[in-house]
Amino acid sequence: MSQQGFVIVGAGMAGAKAAEALRGSGFDGTITVLGDEAHRPYERPPLSKDLLLGKGERDDIFVHAEDWYREHDVDLQLGTEVTAIDRGGRLVEIAGGGVRYDKLLLTTGARPRTLDIPGATADGVLYLRQLADSERVKETLDRVSRLLVIGSGWIGLEVAAAARQADVAVTVLGTSELPLLRALGPELGAIFADLHRSHDVDLRGGVSVSEITTADGKVTGVRLADGTEIAAEAVLVAVGAEPNTRLAEQAGLRVDNGIVVDAGLRTDDPNVFAAGDVASAFHPLLGKHIRVEHWANALNQPTVAAANMLGNQTEYDELPYFFTDQYDLGMEYHGYVDPGRPHQVIFRGDVAAREFIAFWLADGKVNAAINVNTWDVGDPIKSLIRSTKPIDPAALADPNHPLDSFA
């Protein structure tokens, strides 16, 4: 084992956690982590949450202390662009040379989708993915009085909430009639719409932006497809993300909405693995490939990838999980709902007070659940989702019926 060299391309949370898992498993070969950002690996959720709200310290977002990489003999190369992967020669090519590998892990993450409309590159157009983006958005919220958000998904709504808490007027534009419609459906989408409108967000659904208007190269607002103009001093574009699969595609690896891997996070090359936002992984419980752009995958998948890089046979079967904090609403989501499949939504608790659990059922089985301002219910929810027993919807809705009695 000591003669082997492992390379990790992508210095985000997944890459850092993979290096940690390898060393924790006793691997004493070389570990090289290559990242194109200038910062050592950090967690992304604070970028649109605590850090943006001014509640967290910058140093708290990093996965490891600065000395950790040296102390664990991990060669962390920042500001390094990987230009190609030579699978035949087992070589990761970088400017001025290359790094050879016995096993390679791709944790290249995702990038924000951009808009291809007039004004999209103007001064004042913002995106939020990296630390520098978050700092730029925070600086913008400190000096502007009106922000416009294009996109009514998680990032757009979290930034909208941060802006309102900074006393910035906010307009949110979405192509769907309700926010989070694809992720949560109409029942929960309506709850989030009410939440933001109760905080004076001008939320508009079913609209399309044709142009970001400018004057002297700076943002002045947007023009909608119907000709409506909305003024703003800055525009945040939050219309989703795309997996960074260029290297994998050029190397001839299978790509389909991410780098396709099995339940052990192996690609179709036995020496190459993928984890985190970029991985479209086969999920044993769901029986299909899914790609999840959330913190929990970046935290947990690397342990499985590292184990299999070391020759073990381990599967990743954690349920998808994510969370959000907006105003006084805290929420956790467990499970997976196929957007193309009809589901029955069952509420348990006080929806009007925004203290409840919502369950998505199909064919008598719970596929996912969201707990809003209701805590310490994660374990029974996950047991419910993993259970094969049919669930009585009426009993599920009854808060007097213990959740752990269903499993």
Image: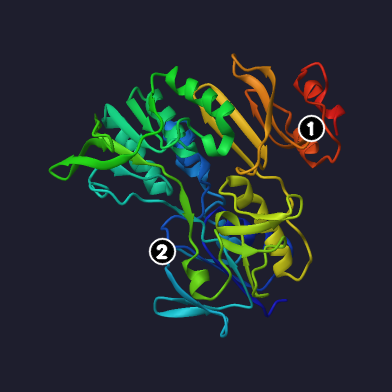
- Decide which of 248, 21 is in the foreground and name it: 248
Instruction: Name the spot of residue 84 as percent of width and height, x first.
Output: 46, 75
The reply, left or right, for residue 200 in relation to residue 375 is left
Disc 2: CA contacts within 10 A as few (<14), some (14-19) or many (>=20) = some
Residue 64, placed above or below residue 169: below
Q: Which of marks 1 and 2 is in front?
A: 1
Q: What element carries label 2?
A: loop
Instruction: Name the spot of residue 322 as percent of width and height, x first.
Output: 61, 40
The reply, left or right, for residue 381 in relation to residue 278 is right
Instruction: Name the spot of residue 228 as percent of width and height, x first.
Output: 25, 31
In this rendering, does residue 57 appear at all? Answer: no
- Label 1 vs label 2: CA separation? 43 Å
Instruction: Say which residue label 2 marks.
Output: 79
Quadrant where the image shows the C terminus: top right
- Decide which of 185, 195 is in the foreground and name it: 185
Identify the image's colour scheme: rainbow, by chain, secondary structure or one colour: rainbow
